[in-house]
Image (tube, helix red, strand yellow):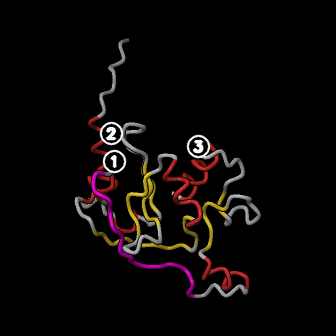
């Protein structure tokens, strides 16, 4: 999700140097950044125990790809990161068509970003790690939904 947002910011918002500060700390458009309360820890190289790690709740917006996958308004997913969508860019991204379909219950942290289905049948990225909760006989809801959408696509038969 983080790199998708950087690319979306470059191509759709027109911020040619948009990036995550994890890759380019000097970017003029830090669309992915350390949250303000974490910057002091980073500056002091005090990183122990500062990562967002473990299960966190997220609210899912009805009428989205994510909601179709989860069939629930409230979920819990596992995280392992320090960088988040920069709150200064959320409205700009939404105004240009990006949907934040999952977010922390207080709407401060963005958890899932997707494109409307009329622009792409299944474009979705997550802040969390769905692979942490997926098993061979019990796939994660997002993986299951991706396969369902792909299987339902009408692919023209190739004539030889």
C-beta proximity under 8 Å, tags 2 and 3? no
Vertical comparison of 40 with 16: above or below: below
**Tag 3 or tag 1, which sits nearer the N-term?**
3
Label 2 CA crowd tier, 10 Å (few <14, some 14–19, many 20+)? few
Q: Quadrant of residue 43?
A: bottom right
50 vs 79, left or right, is right
**Residues rendered magenta in the picture:** 49-63
Residue 76, image x, y percentages: 33, 72
Vertical comparison of 105 with 131: above or below: below
Instruction: Report the front residue among 9 and 149.
Output: 9
Report the Cα–Cα distance between label 2 and label 3. 25 Å
- Magenta span contains residue 55: yes
Q: Which mark is residue 121?
A: none
Helix, strand or loop at mark 1: helix
Q: Which mark is residue 146?
A: 1
**Tag 2 residue:** 150
Count the marks.
3
Label 1 CA crowd tier, 10 Å (few <14, some 14–19, many 20+)? some
Which residue is at 64% across, 47% downward?
10
Q: Quadrant of the C terminus?
A: top left
Report the Cα–Cα distance between label 1 and label 2. 6 Å
Q: Main secondary structure of the magenta part?
A: strand
130 vs 86, left or right, is left
Residue that sits furthest to the left in the current view: 71
Which residue is at 26% across, 59% downward?
70
**Tag 3 residue:** 12
């Amino acid at each position: 999700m983080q790199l998708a947002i950087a690319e979306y910011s470059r191509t759709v918002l027109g911020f040619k140097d948009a990036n995550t500060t994890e890759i380019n700390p000097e970017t003029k458009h830090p669309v992915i950044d350390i949250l303000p309360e974490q910057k002091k820890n980073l500056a002091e190289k005090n990183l122990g125990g500062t990562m967002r790690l473990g299960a966190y709740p997220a609210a899912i917006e009805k009428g989205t790809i994510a909601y179709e996958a989860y069939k629930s308004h409230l979920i819990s997913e596992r995280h392992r990161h320090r960088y988040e969508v920069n709150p200064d860019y959320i409205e700009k991204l939404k105004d240009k068509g990006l949907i934040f379909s999952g977010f922390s219950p207080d709407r401060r942290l963005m958890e899932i970003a997707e494109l409307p289905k009329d622009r792409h049948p299944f474009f979705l990225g997550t802040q969390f790690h769905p692979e942490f909760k997926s098993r061979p006989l019990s796939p994660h809801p997002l993986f299951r939904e991706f396969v369902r959408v792909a299987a339902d696509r009408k692919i023209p038969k190739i004539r030889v």
